[in-house]
Image (spheres, rainbow, N blue to C red):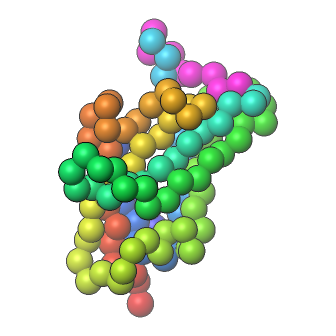
Amino acid sequence: MVEINNNIIRFSRGDEVTFTFSATDESGSAYQFQAGDVINFRIMQANGYNKELVLEKDFAINAETTSVEISLTPQETTIGEEINKPKDYWYEIALNEYNTIVGYDKGPAILTLLPARV
């Protein structure tokens, strides 16, 4: 299960997670990702400005498209120690490494990790 609401992503630790990501250009139109573009998805610790990286995964764009599927395996979502209550992380989505689309400098981007389902 993955929930996305206003740049807040929620899922359970150890879940397989897939969601579709799209962006807009300066005019507000759907952004056209190009073949050869790379979407960088990063999860960081949510304390201070240190931004300790917890997970980084890249998604290559093979053909022109307006949306990208971001998928994480159960191993990739088994972040940190086991938890018994929700834990917040920060995340960012960048285009070609340096162009932040969603993330710290664009407003809150919170990833809430829920305890593993039994």
> Left of 104 or right of it: where is 67?
right
The spot of residue 65 in percent (x, y) is: 69, 29
Looking at the rendering, the stretch of residues picked out in magenta corresponds to 27-34
Q: Which residue is located at x 47 percent, y 75 percent? A: 78
Farthest bottom residue in view = 118
Q: Which residue is located at x 27 percent, y 68 percent? A: 87
The spot of residue 13 in percent (x, y) is: 42, 74
> Left of 73 or right of it: where is 12?
left
> In the rendered view of the protein, which quadrant contains the C terminus?
bottom left
> Left of 19 or right of it: where is 84?
left
- The answer to whether 48 is drawn above or below residue 94 in the figure is below
How many tags in the picture?
0
Image quadrant where residue 116 sits: bottom left
Farthest top residue in view = 27
> In the rendered view of the protein, which quadrant contains the N terminus?
bottom left
Q: Is residue 60 among what the camera can see? A: yes
Q: Which residue is located at x 65 percent, y 36 percent? A: 38
Q: Which residue is located at x 53 percent, y 63 percent? A: 17
> Left of 56 or right of it: where is 115?
left
Majority secondary structure of magenta residues: loop
- The answer to whether 34 is drawn above or below residue 43 in the figure is above
Q: Is residue 6 among what the camera can see? A: no
The spot of residue 59 in percent (x, y) is: 65, 45
Q: Nearer the viewer, residue 49 or 112?
A: 49
The spot of residue 48 in percent (x, y) is: 21, 51
Is 29 within the magenta? yes
Is 83 within the magenta? no
- The answer to whether 16 is drawn above or below residue 51 in the figure is below
